[in-house]
Image (cartoon, helix red, strand yellow):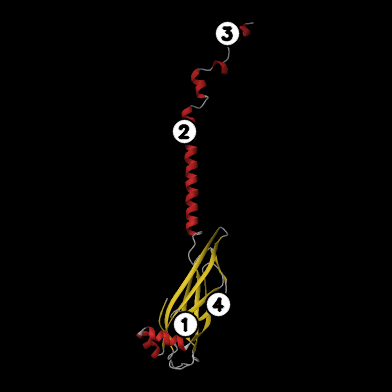
Amino acid sequence: EEIMAKSLSSPSPNKYNMTTEEVITMFPSRKEEKQSSSKCLVYALVVLVAILFIWLVFASIVLRVVDPQIQLKSARLMHNTKNHSFSSTSSLNVTMIARVSLTNPNLFGRFYYGNSRVSVLYGASIVGAWELEGARLEGRETKEIDFMVHMRFSTKLLVIMRNLTNDTAHSDSAGMLKLRSYAKLSGTVHVLNMVNKKKTLGMACIMNLNLTSYSTQHFQC
C-alpha cells in the first residue's frame, strides 16, 4: 500500500507533462523552413546556371559552323600548246592545268557538297569549263584536285576584245590573255548529327596567261 501510494503521489514524467518550451523545440519554426527552402532554390539556380554555361561553351566550340573554303591554288598552260597569231583566221585553242583546294575547317563537322562547275571567262564569254564532282570532306580535311580546262578563243571574240580597250589590244599583241575563273559550290555541314547548315562557296580569280612562256602572271583570287 505504501508503494502504491508513493507511486500515485509522485508520478513519473511523461510526454504529457512537457513544458511549452519543450513542445516548441520539437517542431521546426517557419523561419527555419524558409531558410531551408531558400537554400534549395539557390542550389537549383546554381545548377541551372552551370548547365547553361556548359551548353554555351559546347555550342560555341563544338556546334559552331565555320564556312568551308575553295581556292584556286595554281594555273599554267601545257607546254605543247601552240601559240597562234592573233591575226590568223583560225581559232586559238589553249589547254590550262589548274589545281583547286577544298578545305573544311570544322573539327566535328563533315561537309557534303554537290556537283559544281569551274568556268573560265575571257571578257564576258565562257571559253572553258570543268565539272567538279560532289563528294564529302571530313573534319579538318583539305583536298587538292588537279584538272585540265580546254579553252577555245574564236577569232571574232579576240577581235572584239582587242577593240574594247587599248590595254587589251596591247596585251593580245604581246601574247597575253587576261582571264577570269569562277566557281560556285553548294553543300551542307553536318555537326554530330545535331546541326545541319547549308553553305554556298564562291571563288573568283583573275590571271594573265602568257602564251609565249606558257605561264600565268598577276595571278589573284
Q: Nearer the viewer, mark 3 or mark 1?
A: 1
Task: Please give left or right for residue 2 compared with residue 19 in the image.
Answer: right
- In this view, the residue farthest toward the left is 166
Q: Earlier in the sequence, mark 4 or mark 2?
A: 2
Q: Earlier in the sequence, mark 4 or mark 3?
A: 3
Q: Earlier in the sequence, mark 3 or mark 2?
A: 3
Q: Which quadrant of the figure contains the N terminus?
A: top right
Q: Earlier in the sequence, mark 3 or mark 1?
A: 3
The alpha-carbon separation of the residues under discs 3 and 2 comes to: 46 Å
Q: Nearer the viewer, mark 4 or mark 2?
A: 4
Q: Nearer the viewer, mark 1 or mark 2?
A: 1
Image-quadrant location for residue 17: top right
Check residue 131 in the rendering and tell me which mark sits there, or answer none: 4
Foreground pick, 117 / 2: 117
Identify the amino acid type marked 1. Answer: Ala
Label 2: element kind: helix
Identify the amino acid type marked 2. Answer: Gln
Foreground pick, 163 / 19: 163
- Whether the residues at callouts 4 and 2 have beta carbons within 8 Å, the answer is no
Q: Is residue 209 visible?
A: no
Q: Position of residue 83 (x, y in %)?
A: 46, 92
Label 4: element kind: strand
Disc 1 marks which residue? 75
